[in-house]
Image (cartoon, helix red, strand yellow):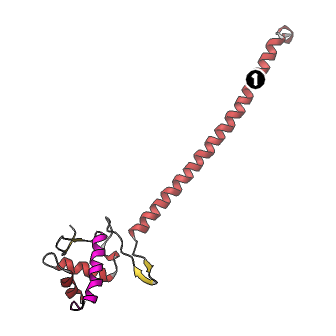
């Protein structure tokens, strides 16, 4: 009985509006599902990033110099000095050079370092590789070279 009393035009409008709202609900449900999926992906990405950052930090902390190839010969790469990186991460001969500079009473010449580490300083061809190592240690921040050519430890 009530149906008979309702305006058919009004019923048509109500039905159309209900269809619009159903369609809108479906679109929003799809959009919400997409938002949730993306949020889940971001959470996974964040966990992976945290884990990888931790792994990289551990690798850097325990990093030892890695042999490289130069001119077909295997050479030991000298890392840059960074906070937390100890001298024992350097190859043994570089550790001896730093120790020789450190035990000197003041800044030293390459010849003086050579005498301490056992290089034949009377032969220039044997002194130059030592000088190169000293300069490499300066370039990597392990030692300091004064304007007069003498070497000293960094503070």
Residue shown at the point (82%, 9%) measured from the top left: 7
Examine the structure image and report whether residue 127 is included in the region drawn in magenta: yes
In this rendering, position of residue 71 left or right of residue 31:
left
In this rendering, position of residue 74 left or right of residue 6:
left
Give the residue at the far left of this rendering.
105
Given residues 33 and 4, the one toward you in this image is 33
In this rendering, position of residue 22 left or right of residue 72:
right
Quarter holding the N terminus is top right
Residue shown at the point (74%, 30%) measured from the top left: 23
Give the residue at the far front of this rendering.
124
Residue picked out by circle 1: 18
- Which contiguous range is marked in magenta? 120-141
Work out whether 136 lies above or below 43. Answer: below
Crowding at dot 1, Cα within 10 Å, few <14 / some 14-19 / many 20+, comes out as: few
Examine the structure image and report whether residue 151 is included in the region drawn in magenta: no
Give the residue at the far top of this rendering.
5
Q: Position of residue 144 (x, y in %)?
A: 22, 70
Residue shown at the point (19%, 76%) measured from the top left: 102
Residue 149 lies in what quarter of the image?
A: bottom left
């Amino acid at each position: 009985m009530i149906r008979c009393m309702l305006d058919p035009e009004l019923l048509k409008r109500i039905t159309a509006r209900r269809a619009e709202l159903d369609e809108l609900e479906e679109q929003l449900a799809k959009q919400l599902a997409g938002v949730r999926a993306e949020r889940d992906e971001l959470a996974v990405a964040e966990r992976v990033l945290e884990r990888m950052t931790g792994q990289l930090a551990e690798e850097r902390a325990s990093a030892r110099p890695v042999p490289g190839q130069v001119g077909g010969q295997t050479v030991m790469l000298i890392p840059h000095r960074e906070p937390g990186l100890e001298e024992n991460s350097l190859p043994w001969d570089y550790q001896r050079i730093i120790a020789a500079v450190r035990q000197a009473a003041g800044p030293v010449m390459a010849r003086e370092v050579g005498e301490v580490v056992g290089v034949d300083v009377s032969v220039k061809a044997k002194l130059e590789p030592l000088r190169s190592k000293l300069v490499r240690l300066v370039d990597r921040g392990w030692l300091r070279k004064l304007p007069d050519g003498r070497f000293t430890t960094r503070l």
